[in-house]
Image (tube, grey):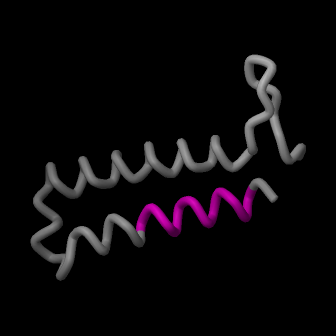
Amino acid sequence: MPREIALLDTLVPTLLFGFLAASLGSLIIDWLFTRYHLYGYIWYPSLFRLAAFSCMFTLSGLWIY
């Protein structure tokens, strides 16, 4: 897979799309946990959100490269 993608005559890193996908996945997980009141079982919700985003972004980076 190429390291950069031409988007409107601008080279953007491929990880940008992984970042956007991880952000969307993080928002979906946050919405589900809020909707079903699952944050009551988690000790520190902000740390969980950060860890979930970090895991998704790292996995997308490993998948891309």
Identified at 80% across, 33% down, the residue is 11
Q: Which residues are magenta?
A: 52-63
When asked about the image quadrant of residue 59, the answer is: bottom right
Height in image: 2 above or below 56? Answer: above
Residue appearing at x 74%, y 17% in the figure: 8
Residue 2 shown left or right of residue 24 in the figure:
right
Q: Nearer the viewer, residue 48 or 38?
A: 48
Horizontal placement of 30 versus 25: left or right?
A: left
Which residue extends farthest top? 8
Q: Percent x, y for residue 6?
A: 82, 27
Residue 5 at x, y = what percent?
A: 81, 34
Whether residue 65 is in magenta: the answer is no
Q: Residue furthest bottom?
A: 43
In this picture, is 1 found above or below 59?
above
Quadrant of residue 62 within the rendered picture: bottom right
Quarter of the view holding residue 42? bottom left
Magenta-colored stretch includes residue 53:
yes
Residue 44 percent coordinates (x, y):
20, 77
Q: Compare residues 37 and 21 and report the one nearer the observer.
A: 21
Q: Position of residue 33 (x, y in %)?
A: 22, 57
Tell me the residue at 74%/44% (across/down): 14
